[in-house]
């Protein structure tokens, strides 16, 4: 089974600073990769996905992520944090066979004014 | 937009009760999933279904069962609720058999077992 590691369960950034949330996966075969955001008391909302096309993927709300096969990583970035970005972020992978997702344990992002 | 609706946002039940959590999706998705979410543990898959009347165990099926009698509806059943089943439960659905399709989530049911 896949393993997904999100380094840093809590990340704090100042408003306007770069956001970097890390995600590494374990598969030797590149899977499909997703980032989700969860606001308080809500379900998960898709931010972006990588499905074997361009390695740099742009998503909603100014977020983007870069797939790096050599590093088995799919880190999420945003150039300038906004207060509304404060939320929990989950990385997920899906193997190319089957529909099961494997989620990381999440990173809680705090934005300091 | 895909709409996944969970019947209750908050639910309080007592130990030993049989509990039903309902989930309905409006996009004719083949696949439906039930997860529980606990702090520090992320999302853990309980059960999933690829088609009507089909079900597959996920990573933590013990103490749970599911029912999918209609394509749009996927029910999670706690046969005899216990306090360690207090959690946030999330339902999701996705399209087709291709694993590059994202899962779409409901808003969750926060279940407390007293």
Image (cartoon, rainbow, N blue to C red):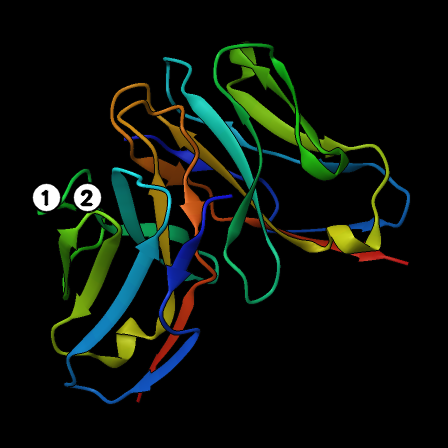
- Within the image, what quadrant is residue B111 found in? bottom left
Instruction: Specify the quadrant that holds the N terminus of chain A.
Output: top left
Q: Nearer the viewer, residue B103 or A16?
A: B103
Residue A47 location (% of width, % of height)? 60, 37
Crowding at dot 1, Cα within 10 Å, few <14 / some 14-19 / many 20+, comes out as few
Question: What is the chain identity of the residue bearing mark 2?
Answer: B
Whichever of labels 2 and 1 marks the residue nearer the N terminus, that label is 2
Mark 2 in CB contact with mark 1 (< 8 angstroms): yes
Label 1 sits on a secondary structure element that is loop
The answer to whether residue B42 is above or below residue B94 is below
> Residue sitting at 60 percent across and 10 percent down?
A54
The answer to whether residue B16 is above or below residue A83 is below
> Residue sitting at 51 percent across and 32 percent down?
A34
| Left or right position of A13 against B61 | right
| Left or right position of A11 against A48 | right
Which residue is denoted by mark 1 in the rendering? Answer: B54
Label 2 sits on a secondary structure element that is strand
Which residue is denoted by mark 2 in the rendering? Answer: B49
Q: Nearer the viewer, residue B55 or B1?
A: B1
């Amino acid at each position: 089974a896949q393993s997904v590691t999100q380094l840093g369960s809590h990340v704090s950034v100042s408003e306007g600073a770069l956001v970097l949330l890390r995600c590494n996966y374990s598969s030797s075969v590149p899977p499909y990769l997703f980032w989700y955001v969860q606001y308080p008391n809500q379900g998960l909302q898709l931010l972006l996905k990588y499905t074997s096309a361009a390695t740099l993927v742009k998503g909603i709300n100014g977020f983007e992520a870069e797939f790096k096969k050599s590093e088995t990583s799919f880190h999420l970035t945003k150039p300038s944090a906004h207060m509304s970005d404060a939320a929990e972020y989950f990385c997920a992978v899906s193997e190319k066979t089957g529909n099961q997702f494997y989620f990381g344990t999440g990173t809680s992002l705090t934005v300091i004014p | 937009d895909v709409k996944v609706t969970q019947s209750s946002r908050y639910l309080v039940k007592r130990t030993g009760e049989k509990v039903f959590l309902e989930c309905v999706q409006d996009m004719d998705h083949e696949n439906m999933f039930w997860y529980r979410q606990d702090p520090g543990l992320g999302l853990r898959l309980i059960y999933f279904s690829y088609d009507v009347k089909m079900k597959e165990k996920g990573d933590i099926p013990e103490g749970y069962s599911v029912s999918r009698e209609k394509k749009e509806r996927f029910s999670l059943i706690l046969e005899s609720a216990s306090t360690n089943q207090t959690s946030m439960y999330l339902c999701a659905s996705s399209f087709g058999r291709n694993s590059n399709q994202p899962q779409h989530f409901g808003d969750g049911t926060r279940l407390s077992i007293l």
